[in-house]
């Protein structure tokens, strides 16, 4: 068993920054060729440059995952350019607001679901035939600790990420016979621009970290290494599982 990804072809969504970018680079470092998908072409070219500097092939796929047909086309094109697909990392997602349910606009709820759940359905459906070809495919769905328990003022995001965990387990059962493993990776509070709103004030940051036993933010690289594990043969008998990397947050009473 090995964490080596030599010869693997991976597609990472939301790869222009944060966790997605760290995963894409870690995969290249482990030997994989990587297609990177996100909205920002300039940032994608930057990460593609890092991948190529490691001696691996990089494919840039520009798409806004909120646009289903454009995203499906980008995924199909990226897989063709890679020459197939072995690993899919559904990382694209996020949350841009915090508000109680009673005051939430339905439009905000719907956009959150489209970004964090619907987009993963579109991408996964498009990728499944290629992942099944060699009977050795892997899907890693990036969820959140917000999906493990109540998330006051972030119910929209927590609900989407909880649904993703259920989707992960259902898909794992449905695709096991195809030789595809499907697991979820659950980061805690990670120091990226997507969590800037939790650092809006010293008080807000202190409140966030007060629930983390390790008393610090995680790094994108600390999520990328478990993502390498889930894609590798070291996790060959692991499917339908939820791997939590959160500094102990979910263990708190």
Image (cartoon, rainbow, N blue to C red):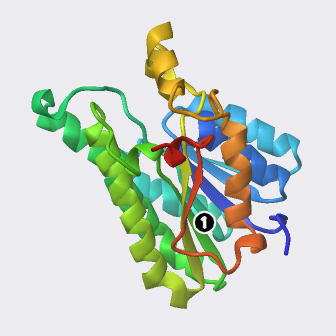
Query: Farthest residue toward the bottom?
Result: 177
Q: Residue at x 57, y 82 (%)?
A: 132
Corner quadrant of residue 88: bottom right
**Does any portion of residue 225 appear in the rendered image?**
yes
* The C terminus: image quadrant: top left
Q: Give the residue at mark 1.
A: 80
* The N terminus: image quadrant: bottom right
Residue at disc 1, secondary structure = helix
Residue 210: % across, % down: 52, 25
Q: Residue at x 82, y 64 (%)?
A: 3
Query: Farthest residue toward the front?
Result: 253
Task: Looking at the picture, tell me which residue is in the foreground, 202 or 231.
Answer: 202
Local packing at callout 1 (Cα closer than 10 Å; few below 14, some 14-19, many 20+) is: few
Q: Residue at x 59, y 64 (%)?
A: 79
Report the number of numbered marks: 1
Give the vertical position of 59 relative to 197 (above or below): below
Give the vertical position of 97 relative to 91 (above or below): above
Residue 214: % across, % down: 65, 33
Give the vertical position of 181 relative to 162 (above or below): below
User: In this image, 232 relative to 77: left or right?
Assistant: right
**Does any portion of residue 16 appear in the rendered image?**
no
Task: Looking at the picture, tell me which residue is in the foreground, 46 or 211.
Answer: 211
Corner quadrant of residue 17: top right
Task: Looking at the picture, tell me which residue is in the foreground, 132 or 77.
Answer: 132
Residue 111: % across, % down: 25, 40
């Amino acid at each position: 068993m090995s964490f080596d990804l030599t010869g693997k072809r991976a597609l990472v969504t939301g790869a222009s920054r944060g966790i997605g970018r760290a995963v894409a680079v870690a995969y290249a470092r482990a030997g994989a060729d990587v297609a990177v998908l996100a909205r920002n072409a300039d940032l994608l070219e930057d990460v593609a440059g890092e991948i190529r500097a490691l001696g691996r092939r990089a494919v840039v796929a520009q798409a806004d995952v909120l646009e289903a047909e454009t995203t499906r086309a980008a995924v199909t094109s990226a897989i063709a350019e890679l020459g197939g697909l072995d690993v899919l990392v559904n990382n694209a997602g996020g949350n841009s607001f915090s508000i109680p349910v009673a005051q939430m606009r339905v439009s905000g709820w719907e956009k959150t679901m489209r970004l964090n759940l619907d987009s993963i359905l579109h991408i996964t459906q498009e990728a499944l035939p290629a992942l099944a070809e060699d009977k050795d495919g892997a899907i890693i769905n990036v969820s959140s600790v917000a999906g493990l328990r109540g998330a006051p003022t972030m119910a929209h995001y927590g609900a989407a990420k909880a649904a993703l965990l259920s989707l992960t387990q259902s898909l794992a059962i449905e695709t096991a016979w195809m030789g595809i493993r499907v697991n979820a990776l659950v980061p805690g509070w990670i120091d990226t621009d997507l969590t800037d709103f939790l650092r809006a004030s010293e008080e807000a940051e202190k409140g966030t970290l007060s629930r983390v036993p390790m008393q610090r933010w995680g790094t994108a690289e600390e999520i990328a290494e478990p993502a390498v594990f889930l894609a590798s043969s070291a996790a060959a008998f692991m499917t339908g599982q939820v791997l939590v990397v959160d500094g102990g947050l979910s263990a708190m009473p």
